[in-house]
Amino acid sequence: MITLSKNCDEYTDHVSSQVNVIATHESSSNCILKTTVMSCQEKQFERPDDFTMNTIKDKVRSLAEENELCSGLDYSKFKYDIKTVIIGSKSTELNGEDLYKRRMASNCADGFDIKKINSHNNYTCRNFGEMERVNDGKKVKNYHMKFTGILPSCEQGFELSEQTDEDIRKLVQYRAKEEGLKMKLEDIACDTFGAPVL
């Protein structure tokens, strides 16, 4: 039986990813459980959202209760190895390298038609956390370092979508890595001005 994440309403929501899970108990290498959860999250597909993670934990607990190799163990002490397969997101989500190559946001992925572009998004981004140098692993901070550019997008309305905002930060993260610095996505803050295409 397929398990749907708590972020899905089976009649209306669109399943976007299949999350394959191997859960290993910290105290017993014999207690290994495998399961799959279908998620309906609409962004950041590379990691399960809170609803999906809660569904995974509930499913693993239920499987552990039925498995004699896991009996008597603390069900909160599992380590999760998670692999996500995107199967049908409402909008294709591109990674930083694809965004760099395509020079268009994820919401243009339906054909990458230049005629559908309706916003040129000028951005200035900074990193407000620690960065790691790729060559030696040293942690560094540089709040004055700026990344600027333009990412065209195909917005549904007049506002810049959350997905385009995330795309810009992914693009900056990719560019920084190419320059030898690893950044966390959540540490990147951007000022973006979307100029409508007339």
Image: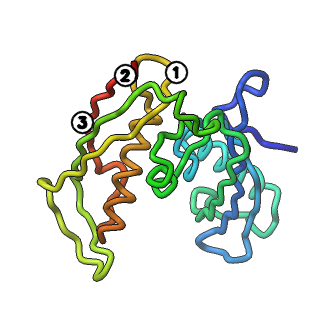
Return the disc, 3 or 2, that comes first in the chain's sequence.
Answer: 3
Q: Secondary structure at mark 1?
A: loop
Vertical placement of residue 182 versus 123, above or below: below
- Give the alpha-carbon distance from disc 3 to disc 1, as whole Å: 20 Å
> Does residue 35 appear left or right of residue 86 in this picture?
right
Pointer 2 local density, CA inside 10 Å: few below 14, some 14–19, many at least 20: some
Q: Residue at x 14, y 54 (%)?
A: 143
Q: Position of residue 137 (x, y in %)?
A: 29, 78
Contact (Cβ within 8 Å) of mark 3 with mark 1: no
Q: What residue would you read off at disc 2?
A: 196
Pointer 3 local density, CA inside 10 Å: few below 14, some 14–19, many at least 20: few
Contact (Cβ within 8 Å) of mark 1 with mark 2: no
Pointer 1 local density, CA inside 10 Å: few below 14, some 14–19, many at least 20: few
Q: Residue at x 61, y 73 (%)?
A: 27
Q: Residue at x 72, y 49 (%)?
A: 18
Which of the pair 53/148 is nearer the observer? 148
Vertical placement of residue 181 versus 123, above or below: below
Q: Nearer the viewer, mark 1 or mark 2?
A: 2
Q: What residue would you read off at disc 1?
A: 156
Q: Secondary structure at mark 3?
A: strand
Amino acid tagged 2: Pro
Image quadrant assignment for residue 6: top right
Q: Quadrant of the C terminus?
A: top left
- Give the alpha-carbon distance from disc 3 to disc 2, as whole Å: 16 Å
Which of the pair 5/72 is nearer the observer? 5
Residue located farthest toward the bottom when viewing the structure as drawn: 136
Amino acid tagged 1: Gln
Contact (Cβ within 8 Å) of mark 3 with mark 2: no
Return the disc, 3 or 1, that comes first in the chain's sequence.
Answer: 1
Q: What residue would you read off at disc 3?
A: 191
Q: Position of residue 87 (x, y in %)?
A: 73, 46
